Amino acid sequence: MSFELPPYDCFLLVSFGGPEGQEDVMPFLENVLRGKRVPRERMLEVAEHYKKFGGVSPINDQNRALLRVIKDEFERVGVDLPIYWGNRNWDPLLPDTIRQMRDDGRKRAIAFFTSMYSCYSGCRQYRENIIAAREQVGPDAPLIEKVRMGFNHPKFIEVMTANLRESIETLGNTAEQSVVLFTAHSIPVSMSSNCDYEKQLRETCRLVAESCGVSQWDLVYQSRSGPPQQPWLEPDICDTIKARDDQQKLESVIVVPIGFISDHMEVMFDLDEEAAEVCEERGIRMHRTRTAGIETGFVEMISDLVQERVEGRENRPAVGGLGAWHDVCPEDCCLYTPQRPPAAGGSPPPGRPVSD
């Protein structure tokens, strides 16, 4: 007995979510941190970060803007898919969005996650969220599959290369003179050991740095939130700036938030305020590059990844040494603990890659 999948009939943007006002901040953070061993004082510290921005996360308006330009790009290239948006932690929540998709008669969605690298929190957890949401909606919930990770897609590399070149020119440096710190969200070492997060990040950093002719670069981390005794990926960006300046006086530094696709809270507070303050105290000129955001090349990349799946294209562009990532994640992909459910992996449609 064979089972024929229905065609893709909609697109789903899957993201983290964020508060829309001061009264949302604590309920939002409780959603984010539920089941995690994060000290309450750290939660209150993060709440203060949101308070400085009126309790409003910038990620929401950035996703709304991204949805608008994706719609325009789909129309330009002839991708006829209605667009939906669902979040992990705040409205519009995934169960509500998937329920609406079901009510609209949708049967099978292709999804893009607003994270570019493979790890539990950036990929597998979203897949688990989707599974749980579909179970809430019931047996008529649409099937949902994700596009592959785009960390080494040529259009993403081109966008980030252009943004780094812009920062080099703004500081008046040559590429050879520039000290570049690529930064990404830190994750627990126990999570990192079961995924390709660091490998993918380093490949993206290398590709962008080489494209710009930059030789002095490092990958650093930011925004850790776990208990102090739990090892997380290091070095921290602020610690790195201080150490580098102590060793050899820094005149300037370029910070590239390579791990983030838009200017959300971790970028605007942890980099534009905390890292910038460290640099100011030490007389270091700092320039933070733009994120991919809604730049044309990035939106075209999303469209390309969607068309790969919708049309079953064999040409899957990727640059560097890692190749195009798998379309469908293996059952053990990005496991945080062995107890995680295998349902977040799966079997691919015929002919689609399931491993790298």
Image (cartoon, rainbow, N blue to C red):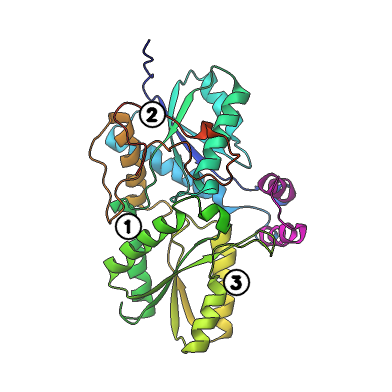
Instruction: State the residue in front, 304 or 42.
Output: 42
Circle 2 Cα neighbour tier, 10 Å, few/some/many (<14 / 14–19 / ≥20): some
Give the CA distance from mark 1 to mark 3: 27 Å
Residue 5 lies, with reference to residue 79, above or below; the image says: above
Residue, x 26% and y 46% (percent of image)?
317
- The residue carrying mark 3 is 274
Q: Label 3 crowding class (10 Å Cα cut-off): few <14, some 14-19, many 20+?
A: some
Measuring from the top left, give residue 15's x and y in whole percent.
Answer: 53, 43
Helix or strand or loop: what does disc 2 sit on?
Answer: loop
Q: Position of residue 89 (x, y in %)?
A: 63, 42
Q: Which residues are magenta?
A: 25-50
The residue carrying mark 2 is 81
Precedes in sequence: disc 2 or disc 3: 2
Q: Is residue 60 above or below residue 306?
A: below
* Residue 74 figure quarter: top left
Q: Quadrant of residue 11?
A: top left
Labelled pair 2, 3 in contact (Cβ < 8 Å): no
- Left or right: residue 102 versus residue 306 is right
Looking at the rendered structure, the kind of residue marked 2 is Leu
- Looking at the image, residue 58 lies above or below residue 73: below
Dominant secondary structure of the residues highlighted in magenta in the image: helix
Q: Amino acid at mark 1?
A: Ile
Indicate left or right for 109 with 237 as reference.
left
Depth check, mark 1 against mark 2: the one in front is 1
**Residue at the spot of label 1:** 157
